[in-house]
Amino acid sequence: MRALLVLLLLPALGSAQRSPVGLTVDPAPEARPALRYELLPSSRDRVAGNAVLHYRNAYAARPSEEREPAKRVAEYEMVLRWEDAKIGELPTKDVAEYLKKYKAVFRELEYGARCKQCEWATAPTSGVEAVAAIVGGLPWQRELARWLSLRCKLELAEKRFDDALRTIQTGLQFGRHVTEGPSLIQMLVGNALVSIFLGRIDALMELPDAPNLYWALSTLPKPFIDLRPGLDGEDLLNESFLPGLAELRKGPVTPERAIELCFASMKAFQGVTESNGLSDFALRIALIARAEFTQAEARKEFIARGRNAKEIAAMPAVQVVFLNSFERYRDIADDYRKWFLLGGPEASAGIEKLGERVKKLKAEAKDDPITQVFLNVLAGTEKTYQSLARTERKIAQLRVLEAIRLHTALSTQLPKELADIKKVPVPNDPTTGRPFEYAITEGGFTLSPAGLKDVPSAATLKYEVTLRVKK
């Protein structure tokens, strides 16, 4: 279920921004002071407390209509129309009246976004029930972001820049907090929420006299999302589906006990990866048969890892093959982890090669139910990385756009190339390490990742910008 959910969420949550994006903008000098605007709450605004409690309170404070199915459907359709409307066509009076009911929701969201801690607790903290608890939180997190995003749109329509920026600040921190949950699912969902509010920065830039956010964007954390909580939680969550792992690792067990423990773990993993599960009888037979067929190779690999040869020789075939398959899985999971944490162009290349390795292993192990179960746990990992990389690229492109607006405000004309911008540093694409492609067009310019054919389509974003000429 977990790996399948990651794959299903990617197209729904990971493509909040379509390419190309058309913008019409003004030249704009840098803000004074430089950090007049900040896109995350500053340390002076942080307060003691657990953000999660306020986020749960925010959802609990939603108006009563949200709890009635008929009214909920009608209002949901209305909100969708407002989300699709252009800023200048938003019925501001109707939206303002509608949002009055969410005053308590927004208050709790703002409190949560400014808390010093964010501790996502699930009860229980392991197994299928833990996955269910994590998945159960996703709908209300998305709902909170939707209401907050609508408020931001209203503030932009009314040209209340300071209010809109505070809402963007709250939304970005809320998204970051969601990514700190103990799983890749929450990392992915939180990243999608972040993309919603980065999209609101696009909308803000289009408004006449919009402030320049170059330094606000440039001083964001790098990477914007802390990957460790999700990666650490994912490791713990995965091992929680192996109730017999600790016993199997201690030393040889009887063949009957090995089959019992390995079978229980495989059934648990099948349940959360949506594997094409065999019947219980067929799974047991496949487990025993595969172990007998591959035990010699598994024993050799295990000894090469430094395990005692006598101990390995005493283990039944199922035990040694299962543990060896788990160690292979851990090797790959650790390789994903190291590239995730490294980031940058080297990580992108490493993740791509690792994806090819996993694909090859899956093909080679098509008749190996043990290896297939472990490899299915990794489904969606590479695409999750691409989703996170897209956020880093988006922030970098926004920095470049603001650098161009700043340059044009000083020189009254567009730079012929990005290297002509001297006032502020112009970032490269963080995923490839190459400069973004910039080209002057009639009345504006385009900005896109270099070598679009080499970049996964899910991670591309091209801007087509018109420069507004003041009369």
Image (cartoon, rainbow, N blue to C red):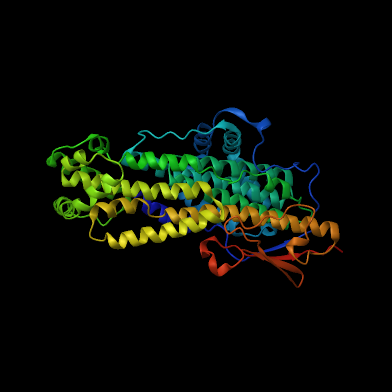
Using the rendered view, name the quadrant where residue 365 is placed: bottom left
Q: Farthest residue toward the right?
A: 471
Q: Nearer the viewer, residue 79 or 443?
A: 443
Q: Position of residue 411 (x, y in %)?
A: 85, 60
Q: How many marks?
A: 0
Q: What x and y, as percent, mark residue 359? A: 36, 61
Q: Is residue 16 visible?
A: yes
Nearer the observer, 347 or 223:
347
Judge whether 90 appears above or below 63 on screen: below
Which of the two residues, 418 or 238, is positioned nearer the viewer here? 418
Q: Residue at x 65, y 62 (%)?
A: 436
Residue 262 appears at what percent x and percent y? 21, 44
Q: Is residue 169 left or right of residue 382?
A: right
Determine the image quadrant of residue 101: top right
Tell whether 236 sits left or right of 431.
Answer: left
Q: Position of residue 226 (x, y in %)?
A: 53, 42
Image quarter (top left, top right, bottom left or bottom right) of the C terminus: bottom right
| 18 left or right, relative to 263 | right
The residue lying toward the viewer, choosing from 452 and 22, is: 452
Q: Is residue 61 above or below residue 291?
A: above
Q: Residue at x 76, y 73 (%)?
A: 442
Q: Which residue is pictured at 34% across the width and 62% down the height?
A: 360
- Check the image and report above or below for 125 versus 423: above
